[in-house]
Image: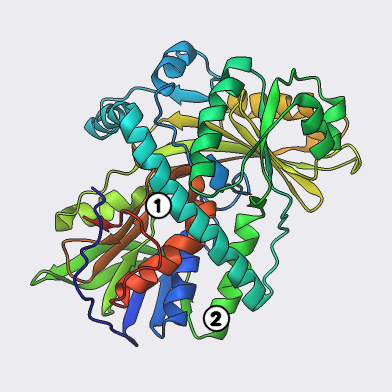
Amino acid sequence: MPARLPDQKAVEVSGVKVLVLGAGVVGVTSAWYLAEAGHEVTVVDRQPIAGFETSFANGGQISVSHAEPWANPGAPLKILRWLGREDAPLLFRPRLSMRQWGWGLRFLYECLPGRTRRNTLEILKLAWFSRNELQALRDRTGIRYEHSELGILHLHTDVRELDAAGARIALMRSHGFEMQLKTPQQCVEIEPALKDSRVFLAGGTYSPHDESGDAHLFSRRLEELCRRVDVVFLFQTTVQRLLQEGGRVTGVRVRHVEGSEQVLRADAYLVCLGSYTPFLVKPLGVRVPVYPVKGYSVTIPIRNFEAAPHVCLTDDGAKLAISRLGDRLRAAGTAELNAYDTSINSVRCNAILRRAEQLFPDAADYWRAQPWAGLRPATPSNVPVVGRTRVSNLFLNTGHGTLGWTMACGSGNAIASIISGKQPPVDFAFADA
């Protein structure tokens, strides 16, 4: 499980060969910061382009304000209340799987108030650092990805949930992050498109420094920047297994799209394979508490730009994120524990679509919506696994859950520091798995 890095003096290294396994938003940002640190970097991914799996059509939010994990004191009762509902925000499909049940039991433990507070603060620290790193990267490179800097408005449709939000606001403010409680009228002032909403609004919270943007587009454009600094990308190349000898990884056996196999070798190996990470590292005795939690989204072409939202939104009642990405609306959310199934459940996608139309009835051509589903790599605590392993040259950057886009730059910067033998520039519970 995650543990703080020791305060011992680090031995700095530079110019080593690093193999990054995975080209989602986390893998690509890791590659970027590793290259900036002076390393020779190669990225391997089974897809034909960067950001083509979980990073492809997520909710788009850079949401430091969403530091409170799924595992919180109110979660168990909600899950019980949602049992049997196919369109429930969180759907648990029991399987004869020790991994699923073990993850679920640990999730319940993380719902204890003390654990929730500890996990919230860890997520907050990394997410805030990451948001700042993203801004610095944007200023430094000029990268553009249909981003918005208008903040995130968190809508509450339940008065009790709105009252409970006060405690979260106090916690965030006590650690220097600005959040504001808003009346229904103030919510409409922040996002005028809500004036036509058919959803009851109890109030909201507003985080003016949060952002949004297209994670897939960011991944593709950062890949282009990486190539300019000599990062090599091997796409349509499937990672099969890690080779180990003498307590070190000696290579990675891969299969190329045409069927040929090859062993790739490097000095250090970084696994950013999301939900598939546990399978790769388990034979080496490394246990990673990551399980896939499927999320859904619909991407809808905007028809009436005046009736469409400009501010990024979170709908607390439906557990949805709604982002404007250029001339499209992206509505994403829900959580489904259903192993590695990536099929699209039309009931769940239609529920997302209905809610988006209720909020913004005249904004878009909802009949042209494009559904999508992806597997979020989640730990029971929602705290990602970033750091070293017991295998001396094997490192991890995974388990970000719904906050992979939010934490990508921060965890990428941090893991580059760790691989370089430096102390990361953020106080976080880095892994020593």
User: Which amino acid type is shown beneath numbered disc 2?
Assistant: Arg
Residue 261 shows in the view? no
Residue 131: give x, y in percent of width and height: 56, 58
Q: Residue at x 29, y 33 (%)?
A: 103
Of residues 171 and 29, the one nearer the viewer is 171
Check disc 1: other Cα within 10 Å, few if <14, some if 14-19, many if 20+.
many
Residue 8: x and y, percent? Answer: 19, 71
Residue found at the far left of this picture: 246
- What's the mark number on residue 227? 2
Q: Residue at x 39, y 84 (%)?
A: 40
The numbered dot on residue 274 is 1
At label 1, the amino acid type is Gly
Residue at (54, 23) in percent of width and height: 164
How many residues crowd mark 2 within 10 Å: few (<14), some (14–19), many (20+)?
some
Occupied quadrant, residue 330:
top right
Going by the image, does 341 lie left or right of 184? left
Q: Residue at (36%, 73%) from the top-left corner?
A: 417
Image-based side of 26 in relation to 302, left or right: left
Q: Residue furthest front?
A: 174
Contact (Cβ within 8 Å) of mark 2 with mark 1: no
Q: Secondary structure at mark 1?
A: helix
Judge from the rendering whether residue 293 lies leftward or rightward of residue 52; answer left or right.
Answer: left
Q: Which is nearer the eye, 51 or 260?
A: 51
Q: Quadrant of residue 246?
A: bottom left
Q: Which mark is residue 169?
A: none
Query: Residue 413 appears at what percent x and percent y?
Result: 44, 68
